[in-house]
């Protein structure tokens, strides 16, 4: 349980030392919340909501008379299959508490400390502290989206260069899943930011709401970038299917040419395979070489015809 009191310098205090007139921020565990929520005046329903074991991306944000309560389901943006972090936010007048519900890599505390380091202590407000922490949650996402764009571009180049490997469907599907999860993650942050801007319970100063607006706009840009990459993915996938169709057509053309070349040979073989006694070629000593010669001539003529037509 760590609480930071904001003044000319940031000091660490205990729960009992919290002053309602001084901006205080803290990081606590779910177990600590269960023992302290009554002292803060939080509803037990919010604690129950924190304890629900739900595996999903969309979080929640609820507005009470004198505080906001929200849950953010975080992801490891580089390893998107891990729903790694789950945190709850409590926001009261001059009080901001982050509850760690699930944090496998201990990144939440690190991001909270980074937020403290990046804010101007002399001009610190509750709104600025909250937005600084929220922005740390997306601080690496621009780089991640650039990496995803590069992966998609590489797949597109492979299609153009006819260097498609059998892993392409798996690769493009993984990227699309990654983008979908990121899109859902940004949606919950947008809802959170817009709810804070509405300031229904008058916790924030009107002129300070711009910090939430700036944060929300940044998340919206990330969400827009994700949508653009999703469309890019769809175009690349269509190009892949078009290339596969072209390859299949090429194979079918080859089979057609081969069948057309050997069809006359099949006719010749079937004709002389009837073995009628009245066939003079059957008893002629040059009959067999003649059939071979005719077959070779037919193949050569067919090959020249198809090459002239540029069919292979």
Image (tube, rainbow, N blue to C red):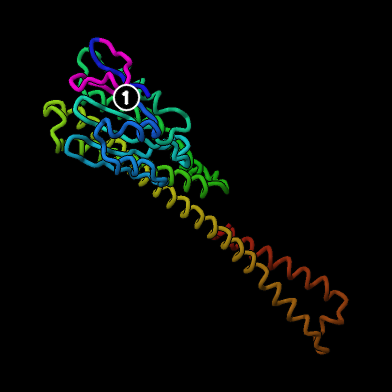
Q: Residues within 10 Å of mark 1 (few under 14, many from 20)?
A: many
Q: Is residue 41 above or below residue 163?
A: above
Q: Nearer the viewer, residue 230 or 256?
A: 230
Counting from the top left corner in percent of width and height, residue 60 is at: 29, 43
Does 66 appear above or below 117?
below
The stretch in magenta equals 9-25
Judge whether 157 appears above or below 266 on screen: above
Q: Could you say which is closer to the camera, residue 160 or residue 282?
A: 160
Report the residue marked by disc 1. Answer: 26
In the rendering, at what x and y percent does residue 201 appear?
A: 14, 36
> Residue at 47% across / 33% down in the picture?
104
Q: Is residue 170 visible?
A: yes
Count of all numbered marks drawn on residues in the image = 1
State the residue in front, 194 or 61. 61
Quadrant location of the C terminus in the rendered image? bottom right
**Left or right for 85, reference 252:** left
Helix, strand, or loop for circle 1?
Answer: strand
Res 182 → quadrant: top left
Q: Inspect the magenta stretch and tell me whether residue 148 lies in it.
A: no
Q: Quadrant of residue 39?
A: top left
Considering every residue shown, the one lying at the far top of the view is 8
Q: Residue at x 68, y 69 (%)?
A: 262
Task: Give the image quarter of residue 138.
Answer: top left
Q: Is residue 246 above or below residue 18?
A: below
| Residue 90 percent coordinates (x, y) | 27, 33
Going by the picture, which residue comes out furthest to the left? Answer: 206
- Kindly tell me whether residue 232 is visible in this rendering: no
- Name which residue lies at 57% across and 49% down: 166
Quadrant where the N terminus sits is top left
């Amino acid at each position: 349980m760590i609480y930071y009191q904001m003044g000319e310098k940031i000091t660490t205090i205990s729960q009992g030392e919290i002053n309602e007139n001084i901006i205080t921020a803290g990081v606590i565990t779910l177990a600590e919340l269960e023992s302290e929520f009554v002292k803060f005046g939080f509803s037990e329903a919010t604690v129950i909501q924190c304890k629900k074991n739900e595996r999903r991306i969309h979080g929640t944000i609820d507005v009470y008379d004198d505080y906001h309560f929200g849950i953010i389901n975080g992801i490891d943006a580089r390893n998107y299959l891990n729903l790694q972090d789950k945190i709850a936010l409590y926001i009261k007048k001059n009080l901001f508490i982050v509850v760690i519900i699930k944090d496998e890599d201990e990144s939440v505390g690190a991001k909270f400390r980074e937020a403290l380091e990046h804010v101007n202590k002399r001009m610190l407000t509750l709104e600025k502290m909250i937005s600084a922490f929220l922005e740390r949650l997306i601080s690496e996402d621009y780089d991640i989206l650039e990496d995803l764009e590069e992966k998609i571009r590489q797949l597109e180049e492979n299609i153009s260069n006819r260097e498609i490997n059998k892993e392409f469907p798996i690769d493009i599907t993984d990227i699309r899943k990654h983008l979908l999860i990121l899109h859902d993650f940004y949606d919950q942050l947008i809802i959170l930011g817009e709810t804070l801007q509405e300031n229904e319970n008058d916790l924030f100063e009107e002129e300070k709401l711009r910090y939430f607006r700036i944060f929300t706009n940044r998340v919206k840009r990330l969400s827009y970038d994700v949508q653009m990459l999703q469309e890019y993915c769809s175009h690349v996938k269509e190009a892949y299917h078009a290339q596969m169709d072209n390859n299949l057509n090429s194979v079918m053309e080859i089979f057609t040419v081969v069948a057309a070349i050997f069809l006359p040979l099949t006719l010749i073989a079937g004709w002389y395979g009837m073995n009628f006694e009245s066939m003079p070629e059957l008893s002629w000593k040059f009959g067999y070489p003649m059939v071979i010669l005719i077959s070779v001539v037919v193949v050569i003529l067919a090959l020249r015809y198809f090459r002239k037509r540029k069919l292979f």
